[in-house]
Every structure is written in structure tokens, then in C-alpha cells.
């Protein structure tokens, strides 16, 4: 993956990153706000070696004290110091539990020992810290004179008593929130890329390019009003979806470096990928060029062309195939264009056998002689074999792939099924592509022609050939009035 691929993943999966980050941030803040506040305070004990009149003696004594600081720190958390503190303060805990509340540290190259105590009560934290410091001073003096001498070689003094803390030391809401935010961002990024790697659906042309060598010859945008706007090449002739279908029409002319096949099967891998809508709009787009086009609804299981176009579908393809009518008798013109529609007719009990019959071959031969282009809307490839049967009778097959719907394995199985019957796959139409995809952002922005109000107005020319000076306020167009 390149940098642009990572950016594309983040653009597509940003809701996952956002949700995980917010959840981790909320969890860290909730844990901080619900946690019991704890208070920490410290007292300092200074250690010095007694005796010595010369500078050399004092230096040796200071070095000796520094070497003993680690030992004094161990003594501070031992039962020898903590049990008297428990008895003095009347604490209901063991020496081990009290040792868990006390932390002893020694700043480097000093003879100062810091006794820190953490407790849920600020008063208890100060009392315990001062009691431990005082008891440590007494115990260290006793340990440094084991023979019971009156003057101990090492003298400990409580230099800084502990003060009652005014604010809790934990939890740190700001720090925990920042940690939760960073952790959530990292987990969100990881979840986004794991979701991307685990997602086997087709989203972009790159997904198809990594799956097959069959080219993507058009990408059609998502339409919000697809249910009521089936023929968008006429209802929205300057919309991005209509332009994509015209691009498909143009690309089909160069598939075989010639005039292209006169009969095309339009199919998909699964139901609901938009094959019927694609077939209808492609047929209407071809008819706009002046060509005579026949659209056959060859989906003998779930026909939809007649319903989408508002035509009568009681008679049609099956009527011709069983010999009860001719092609000219059942085709229906659509509006005032050169597009004719052949509905399905009655649903037969044996669709595959009827589509693979000699009558179907004869019908296609007659249709290709009478029309410049013949399009067949066939059933999906994976559920039934009707599309593969029809593909062997026509000049080529156009496969519609629904973006964010079809999985790569399903599309690969469909293409393998078509290859098994040695049909010519003309290309793949990536349908319902998200408009947020940066690859199609320009195409989906639209490029509509100027209206009469939007078009610039030329300056009036006088007889001398110079522009006439306006004597009144210039006429403002619609955009100018809106800006005002």
C-alpha cells in the first residue's frame, strides 16, 4: 500500500476511528471521575555523621552517610519502623498494608531521604508520613550505635515535615483523558485497517483491477432517488449518472476496435446491483444517438423493465418464443425515441430451457437484423444459469458490479462462469459508487450548460463600432441578484 492508499482507507473508515477514539476517551474520563481520590504528601529526613574535627573526617563521614542511604530507605518500610507507627497512630492495618502506602526515595548524591505517603484521607497521609519520618530517625540512631553509646555516629533529623495536601494526586483527569485519546486513536486506526483488510467487498476500480483483467468501462454514482428516477439519462440529462452512462456508451464503441457487437447481455452477479437500471439507461442513451435500439427483458424470473418504464408486460418475449406472436407484434415503442421495448410476457416454468432454445436464437438473429443495437436484461449469474446461456448467443456481456455490495469472490466466480462458456466479457460497470470517493469527485461535481440568465450578455455595438455607454443601471442576472 502507498500513502494514497492509506489516505483512502482513512477517508472510507473514518467513522470507525472516530467511534473507537471517543469510546476510549469516554472510558478514561469515566474511570477518572468515578475513581476514589487519593492524596500524597512527603516529609524529608536529613542524615549526618557525628564527630570529626578535620575536613578529611567530615568528607569521609559524608561519604559514609551517602553509602548508608539505601539501607536507611529499606529500614523505613520495614516492620521495625512501621509497627511502632501503627501502634502510635492506632491504625487498623498490618505493617505490610502500611508499607504499600509508603514510598521512600533518595535524591542522587544527597543524604536526604524522602518519605511519601498516599492515602484516601489527606490528614492521614500527613500524619503517617510524619510518624514514619520520626520513627525512622529514632530507629536509625539506635541501629548506628549497637553498643548503646550515648552519641550515635549517624544522626537523622526531620528536615521538612509533611503538610496536609489540598488537592488529590490521583486520578489526574487531564492526563488520563490525553492517554485515553491517544490510545483510542491508535486502536481506531488499527481497527480501521483490520476492517479494511477483512472487507472483501468491491468499492473502487482498484479492487476490480486486482481481481481480474476485465476493464472497468464506466463508474456510475449513487442516486438518492433511484427508486423513482429509473431513466435518469432523460430525467436528469446533465447529471453525473447520465454522463457516466454516456461514457459507457462511448467506451463500448472501442471494445473491439470497431463498431462493437450489436447484441449485448447486461447482467450482474447478484440481485439488486442495478443491472436493469443500467440496461434501461444504456438503451436510452444509445437511442439518443439516433440508433434503432431494442431492449429485451430476458429476466424470466423477476422481470422489471416493463414496471420501471410503465409499460404493459403481459405479452412479450415468451409470447414470441412459444410462437403465438411475432417480434413486430409485441415490441412497444418508448416515448418518441428510437427505443423499442420487448417485455418478458408470461413467466414460464422453464426459463433456462426457453432462453436456450432455437426459438431464442432465431429471435436474436431477427432482432440484430432489424435493430442497430440489441440489449438483453438477464438474471444474475450466480443464482441461475440464464445469463451464461444467453451470453453464448450474443456478441458480448456487460457485467454490473454494485459498489459496497458485491464481494470480490462473488465477482470472480461470475467472471469464471462466463469464461467457462467462452463468452466475450466487454467490461464491468461499477455501479452506485460513493460520491465521496476522491477518484470520481470531479465527474460527480457535474458540468451543466449555462442557462439564459447565466450566460454572459454582449455589449451593444454602436454604428461607429464602439460599445454604447450605458445610461442606466446594468441589468443583473440571477446570480447577481442572489448575491445582492
Image (cartoon, grey):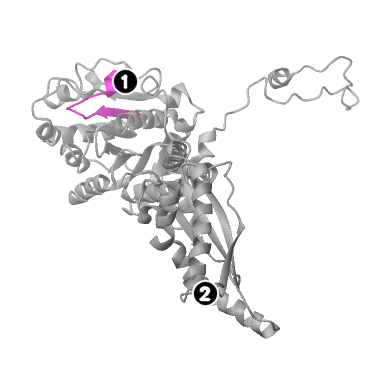
Q: Quick check: 47 left or right of 98?
A: right
Residue 35 or 45: which is nearer the viewer? Answer: 45
* Badge 2 element: loop
Q: Residues within 10 Å of mark 2 (few under 14, many from 20)?
A: few
- In this rendering, is residue 395 above or below 114? above
Estimate the x, y position of residue 47 in percent, counting from the top left: 58, 68
Considering only order in the chain, which callout, 1 or 2, is on the residue closer to the N terminus?
2
Name the element at disc 1. helix
Q: Position of residue 323 (x, y in %)?
A: 12, 24
Q: Of the numbered discs in the image, which one, if any, rests on residue 292?
A: none
Q: Residue placed at 50% from the left, 53% from the top?
A: 131
Residue 222 drawn at (x, y percent): 42, 32
Quarter the N terminus occupies: bottom left
Is-magenta flag for residue 294?
yes
Q: Residue at x 38, y 47 (%)?
A: 191
Crowding at dot 1, Cα within 10 Å, few <14 / some 14-19 / many 20+, comes out as some
Q: Which residue is mark 1?
A: 308
Residue 215 seen: no
369 relative position to 384: left or right: right
Name the side, left or right, on which 61 lies relative to 351: right
> Is 392 part of what is drawn in magenta?
no
Q: Which residues are magenta?
A: 293-307
Toward the viewer: 469 or 254?
469
- Real-space Cα separation, disc 2 to disc 1, in angstroms: 110 Å
481 to 430, vertically: above or below:
above
Q: Quadrant of the C terminus?
A: top right
Give x and y (percent) for residue 241: 45, 32
Which residue bears the numbered disc 2? 149
Amino acid at each position: 500500500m502507498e500513502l494514497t492508499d492509506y489516505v483512502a482507507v482513512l477517508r472510507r473508515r473514518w467513522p470507525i476511528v472516530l467511534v473507537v477514539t471517543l469510546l476510549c476517551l469516554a472510558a478514561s474520563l469515566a474511570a477518572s471521575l468515578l475513581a476514589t481520590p487519593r492524596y500524597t504528601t512527603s516529609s524529608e529526613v536529613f542524615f549526618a555523621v557525628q564527630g570529626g574535627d578535620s575536613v578529611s573526617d567530615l568528607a569521609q563521614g559524608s561519604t559514609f552517610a551517602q553509602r548508608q542511604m539505601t539501607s536507611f530507605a529499606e529500614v523505613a518500610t520495614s516492620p521495625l519502623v512501621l509497627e511502632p507507627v501503627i501502634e502510635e497512630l492506632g491504625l487498623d492495618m498490618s505493617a505490610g498494608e502500611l508499607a504499600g502506602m509508603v514510598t521512600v526515595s533518595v535524591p542522587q548524591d544527597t543524604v536526604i531521604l524522602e518519605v511519601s505517603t498516599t492515602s484516601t484521607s489527606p490528614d492521614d497521609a500527613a500524619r503517617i508520613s510524619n510518624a514514619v519520618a520520626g520513627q525512622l530517625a529514632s530507629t536509625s540512631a539506635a541501629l548506628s550505635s549497637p553498643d548503646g553509646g550515648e552519641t550515635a555516629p549517624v544522626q537523622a533529623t526531620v528536615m521538612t515535615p509533611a503538610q496536609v495536601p489540598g488537592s488529590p494526586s490521583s486520578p489526574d483527569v487531564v492526563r488520563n483523558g490525553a492517554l485515553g485519546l491517544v490510545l483510542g486513536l491508535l486502536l481506531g486506526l488499527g481497527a480501521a485497517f483490520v476492517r479494511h483488510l477483512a472487507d472483501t467487498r468491491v468499492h473502487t476500480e482498484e479492487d476490480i483491477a486486482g481481481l481480474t483483467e476485465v476493464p472497468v468501462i464506466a463508474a456510475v454514482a449513487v442516486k438518492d432517488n433511484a427508486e423513482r428516477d429509473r431513466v435518469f439519462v432523460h430525467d436528469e440529462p446533465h447529471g453525473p449518472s447520465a454522463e457516466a452512462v454516456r461514457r459507457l456508451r462511448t467506451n463500448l464503441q472501442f471494445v473491439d476496435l470497431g463498431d462493437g457487437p450489436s447484441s449485448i447481455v447486461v447482467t450482474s452477479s447478484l440481485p439488486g446491483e442495478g443491472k436493469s437500471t443500467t440496461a434501461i439507461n444504456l438503451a436510452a442513451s444509445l437511442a439518443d444517438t439516433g440508433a434503432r435500439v431494442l431492449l429485451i427483458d430476458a429476466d424470466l424470473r423477476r422481470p422489471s423493465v416493463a414496471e420501471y418504464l410503465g409499460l404493459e408486460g403481459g405479452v412479450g418475449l415468451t409470447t414470441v418464443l412459444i410462437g403465438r406472436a411475432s417480434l413486430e407484434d409485441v415490441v412497444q415503442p418508448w416515448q418518441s425515441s428510437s427505443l423499442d421495448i420487448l417485455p418478458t410476457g408470461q413467466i414460464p416454468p422453464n426459463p433456462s430451457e426457453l432462453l436456450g432454445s432455437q426459438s431464442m436464437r432465431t429471435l436474436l438473429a431477427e432482432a440484430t437484423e432489424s435493430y442497430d443495437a440489441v440489449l438483453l436484461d438477464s438474471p444474475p449469474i450466480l443464482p441461475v444459469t440464464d445469463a451464461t446461456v444467453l451470453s453464448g448467443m450474443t456478441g458480448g456481456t456487460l457485467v454490473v458490479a454494485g459498489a459496497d455490495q458485491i464481494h470480490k469472490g462473488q465477482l470472480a466466480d461470475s467472471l469464471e462462469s462466463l469464461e467457462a462458456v467462452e463468452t466475450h466479457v466487454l467490461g464491468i460497470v461499477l455501479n452506485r459508487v460513493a460520491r465521496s470517493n476522491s477518484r470520481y469527485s470531479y465527474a460527480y461535481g457535474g458540468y451543466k450548460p449555462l442557462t439564459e440568465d447565466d450566460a454572459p450578455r454582449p455589449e451593444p455595438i454602436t454604428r461607429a463600432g464602439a460599445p454604447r455607454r450605458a445610461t442606466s443601471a446594468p441589468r443583473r442576472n440571477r446570480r447577481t441578484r442572489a448575491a445582492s
